[in-house]
Image (tube, rainbow, N blue to C red):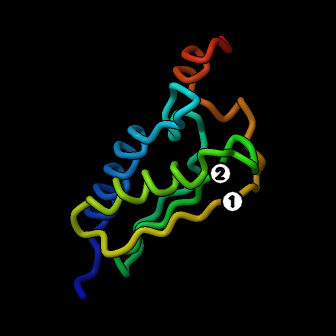
């Protein structure tokens, strides 16, 4: 297996951000990345794209939809052999984690 170059790692991780910006909670008109729900994106030497993601609430009814939508989109990135999305609740998500654009869209600014 060919070693991943720093440029390839950066390109895959940047593409992952772009794609995650197209994943929307059906109840919130803001994408999961801008909401601050993505804690970590890492492309490993084994060509696995690992994403740590949280939810606005542990009982989020859209959790399965969000994870499935994110996985389907991330699997389209060339060079990615597998996508692992880990749902985490540490640190606990707060509105402070949203981008300014998300806060403005939702009326928090």
Q: Secondary structure at mark 2?
A: loop
Q: Is residue 45 above or below residue 102?
A: below
Residue 33 position in % (x across, y down):
50, 40
Left or right: 103 as drawn, with respect to 17: right
Residue visible at 51% across and 55% down in the picture: 67
Residue visible at 43% across and 51% down in the picture: 69
Left or right: 11 as drawn, with respect to 83: left
Residue that numbered label 1 is attached to: 88
- Which quarter of the picture shows residue 107? top right
Residue that numbered label 2 is attached to: 54
Q: CA distance from mark 2 to mark 1?
A: 5 Å
Q: Nearer the viewer, residue 26 or 56?
A: 26
Badge 2 crowding class, 10 Å Cα cut-off, few under 14, some 14 to 19, many 20 or more, is: many
Residue 56 position in % (x across, y down):
69, 41
Left or right: 32 as drawn, with respect to 49: right
Q: Residue furthest bottom?
A: 1
- Which quarter of the picture shows residue 5? bottom left
Residue 34 position in % (x across, y down):
52, 33
Please report whichever mark, 2 or 1, sits nearer to the chain's N-terminal start.
2
Q: Is residue 24 above or below residue 62?
A: above
Q: Quadrant of the N terminus?
A: bottom left
Q: Nearer the viewer, residue 27 or 39?
A: 27
Residue visible at 75% across and 36% down in the picture: 94
Q: Secondary structure at mark 1?
A: loop
Q: Nearer the viewer, residue 80 or 44?
A: 80
Labels 2 and 1 touching (C-beta < 8 A): yes
């Amino acid at each position: 297996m060919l070693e991943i170059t720093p440029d390839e790692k950066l390109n895959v991780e940047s593409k992952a951000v772009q794609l995650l910006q197209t994943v929307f909670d059906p109840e919130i008109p803001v994408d999961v990345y801008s909401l601050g729900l993505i804690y970590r994106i890492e492309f490993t030497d084994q060509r696995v794209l690992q994403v740590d993601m949280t939810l606005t609430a542990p009982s989020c009814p859209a959790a399965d939809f969000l994870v499935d939508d994110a996985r389907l989109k991330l699997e389209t990135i060339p060079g990615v052999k597998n996508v692992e999305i880990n749902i985490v609740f540490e640190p606990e998500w707060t509105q402070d984690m949203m981008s300014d654009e998300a806060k403005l869209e939702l009326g928090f600014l």
